[in-house]
């Protein structure tokens, strides 16, 4: 006997993985709503759509576990139908159909019209920029391109997302205007590779021109750049960053490694010397810029000497923001032909060592901010604190500013100016300036 009664025909969309998946779920939900469907994000619903991630082992495991969890709910009568979409489904559809056959249907990353049809909805081409955003109301992701043409040896993204395909500037401006009309104040530009933007459409790297168009959108205060590939980075973007106050002094540029032999095997198309020169040019041109990067340790063939080269370089470069991941051996990638020869415990030890160094750097950089004033956007209230971010911080991955809610009332989504009164490794404490 079922004790739980779910609202009939309510579609619950569950998102796993990166911000690009968040965006795709929001587009799906916008389409469903336009077809008159009752749709929610990660709440209760009798029809479930799981938007999966297939990037690395941990993400794949989480996706499979989530599918199994909802299959159990289906068997128990708690949900009626389960559909699976996204990167895991794109990459392993035949395996999944064999291993978990009682999922109602599997869809890949480019099969939105088919998924909508299965959910009883029509795909509407005219819905440019119509999304049901799932992020806090003050910021939203703006996906400016899909897919990737880079040949990186360790990366499975081209297998799941296909070739690079830029979205036209005029469509992105329409989308930004609609987001601004709904109260969004910060756009986080995402793609597998921002650096490549425009090459397919305009025959040139056109990120700077896109930014010049987006800064004209009323209501948008901050525009943030995520996932720029270092090779071929269009330096005119820095001119726009310097000139336009709306473009945050922030750049996420995943560098992955710095040892020349590892970079070569990774097929990154660069060297330690070129990368260091590029970063020095960034800092010379926009001295106030915060650079975020991500690194991979334990790549096949990474010797202790390679690791020490990376470790010493991290100490020298003093990145404002840094994340470090252990290498994941992915089928059908170029690196899968290599022997995954760095033991798991060595990978973890190396990642921890890098993050300890970064923690100290971050602490020192944050100490220097005590007494300084910053413009901060308030994302949420948590316990006794309002939690905000400066222009140098992206949601979920970077530092936060904590403001005592017992002393000051602030509105979520609003900007305020604070003075830093205390600092830890990854958090600043601020008081609001009257």
Image (cartoon, grey):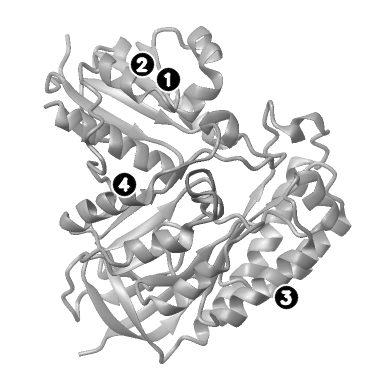
Mark 4 vs 2, N-terminal side: 2
Tell me the element at label 3. helix
Residue located at (81% from left, 49% from top): 264
**Residue under label 3:** 316
Which numbered dot is residue 72? Answer: 2
Q: CA distance from mark 1 to mark 4?
A: 38 Å
Q: Nearer the viewer, mark 1 or mark 3?
A: 3
Q: Residue pushed farthest front?
A: 203
Q: Which mark is residue 68?
A: 1
Where is mark 4, residue-wise? Answer: 171
First reached walking from the N terminus: tag 1 or tag 3 = 1
* Residue density around tag 3, few if under 14, some if 14–19, many if 20 or more, within 10 Å: few
Secondary element at image label 1: helix
Residue drawn at point x = 43 percent, y = 43 percent: 20
- Residue placed at 15% from the left, 17% from the top? 3
Q: CA distance from mark 4 to mark 2?
A: 41 Å
Relative to 268, say whether 209 is above or below. Answer: below
Q: Earlier in the sequence, mark 3 or mark 2?
A: 2
Kindly report which numbered mark, 1 or 4, lies closer to the viewer in this rendering: 4
């Amino acid at each position: 006997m079922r004790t739980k009664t779910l609202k009939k025909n309510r579609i619950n969309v569950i998102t796993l993985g990166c911000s690009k998946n968040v965006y795709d779920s929001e587009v799906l939900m916008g389409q469903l709503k336009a077809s008159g469907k009752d749709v929610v994000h990660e709440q209760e619903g009798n029809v479930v759509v799981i938007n999966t991630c297939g990037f690395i082992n941990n993400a794949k495991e989480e996706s499979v576990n989530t599918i199994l969890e909802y299959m159990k709910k289906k068997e128990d009568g708690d949900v009626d139908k389960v559909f699976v979409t996204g990167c895991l489904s794109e990459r392993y559809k035949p395996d999944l159909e064999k291993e978990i056959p009682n999922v109602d249907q599997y869809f890949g990353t480019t099969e939105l019209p088919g998924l909508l049809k299965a959910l009883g909805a029509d795909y509407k081409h005219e819905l440019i920029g119509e999304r049901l955003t799932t992020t806090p109301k003050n910021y939203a992701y703006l996906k400016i391109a899909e897919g990737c043409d880079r040949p990186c040896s360790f990366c499975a993204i081209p297998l799941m997302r296909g070739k690079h395909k830029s979205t036209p500037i005029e469509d992105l401006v329409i989308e930004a205007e609609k987001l601004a009309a709904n109260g969004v104040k910060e756009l986080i530009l995402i793609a597998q590779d921002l650096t490549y933007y425009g090459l397919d459409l305009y025959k040139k790297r056109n990120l700077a021109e896109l930014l010049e168009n987006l800064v004209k959108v009323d209501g948008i205060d901050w525009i943030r750049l995520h996932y720029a590939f270092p090779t071929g980075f269009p330096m005119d973007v820095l001119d726009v960053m310097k000139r336009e106050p709306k473009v945050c002094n922030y750049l996420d540029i995943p560098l992955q490694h710095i040892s020349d032999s590892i970079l070569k095997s990774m097929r990154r198309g660069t060297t330690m010397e070129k990368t260091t020169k590029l970063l020095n040019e960034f800092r010379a041109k926009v001295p106030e810029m915060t650079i975020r990067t991500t690194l991979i340790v334990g790549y096949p063939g990474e010797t202790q000497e390679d690791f020490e080269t990376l470790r010493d370089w991290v100490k020298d470069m003093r990145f404002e923001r840094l994340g470090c991941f252990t290498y994941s051996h992915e089928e059908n990638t170029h690196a899968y032909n290599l022997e995954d020869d760095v033991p798991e415990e060595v990978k973890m030890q190396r990642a921890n060592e890098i993050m300890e160094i970064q923690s100290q750097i971050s602490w020192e950089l944050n100490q220097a901010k005590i007494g300084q004033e910053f413009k901060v956007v308030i994302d949420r209230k948590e316990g006794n604190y309002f939690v905000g971010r400066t222009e140098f911080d992206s949601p979920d991955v970077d530092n936060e500013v904590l403001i005592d809610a017992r002393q000051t009332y602030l509105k979520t989504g609003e900007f305020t100016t604070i003075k830093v009164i205390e600092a830890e490794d990854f958090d600043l404490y601020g008081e609001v300036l009257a």
